[in-house]
Image (cartoon, rainbow, N blue to C red):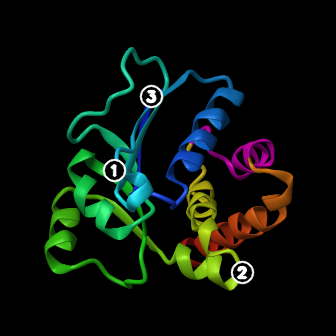
Amino acid sequence: MKLEIVCAGIGGRGVLLASTILIEAAIASGHNAIASDEYGMSQRGGSVVSLVKVGDFKSPLIGRERAHIILAFEESEFYRNIAMLKREGIALVNTQRKTLPDAIYSLAQERALACYLVDADRIAKEKGMIQAANMALLGFFAFLSIEPYTRENVERTIKKRVSEKLLEKNLEIFQAGYMGAKEVLS
C-alpha cells in the first residue's frame, strides 16, 4: 500500500495536529509512515503544509500530481496546492461554498478529481469550538474509510493525541464531521 496525503492550511488551523493523527493512525495499523512539514510564517497566518506518506517511501516529499488526497483546512490553500493532486485524486476542502469557482471546477472535471466541500468551520462553531474545524474535516475524511483511516482508527488516535481537557469536544466535532459526510454521501 502506498498513499500520499497533503494537509494544507494556515497557522492556527490544526494542520500539524491533523497530520500527526494521520501518521500515528497509519503506524498503529501496522503501516510505515513518514512526513515533512513546512510552516515558516504560520504563527502569523501564513501557509502550513504537511506531507504525509503511508507505505514504503524513502523520502517524505510529494511531487507535482503525486498526492492521492488533499485535506485543505483553508480554501485558499486548496487552490495553492491543487497541482500536487494526481488525476482521480480526492480533495476535502473546508469552505462555505456549495460549488467550486468555474475555473477550478473545470480543472477538477478535466483531471477527474473528487472534490468534497465541507463547511468544517460551521460544524466546529455549532459545537462551540471553532478552532477544532480540523476535527470536522478528519471526521468527514474518516467516513471515506480509505485504509488505514477508518472511523475507529482515527478516533482511537485522536483519543491518544488530544489533551483530556479538550478531548470530549474534539470527538464531538469529529463525529459531527463524520455524520455530515454520511448525510452527503449515503
Q: What residue type is labelled 3?
A: Lys
Q: Is residue 160 magenta?
A: yes
Q: Can residue 71 be seen in this view?
A: no
Q: Height in image: 110 above or below 28?
A: below
Residue at the top extreme of this rendering: 58
Position of residue 15 in the picture relative to residue 62 (left or right): right
Magenta stretch, residue numbers: 147-161
Q: Which comes sooner in the sequence, label 2 or label 3? A: 3
Q: Which amino acid does label 2 sit on?
A: Gly
The local secondary structure at tag 3 comes to loop
Which of the labelled discs sits on residue 128, or is there none? Answer: 2
Which of the labelled discs sits on residue 119, or is there none? Answer: none
Occupied quadrant, residue 112: bottom left
Q: Provide residue 41's location: percent of width, then percent of height.
A: 35, 51
Q: What residue type is labelled 1?
A: Gly
Q: Which comes sooner in the sequence, label 1 or label 3? A: 3
Residue appearing at x 21%, y 72% in the figure = 105
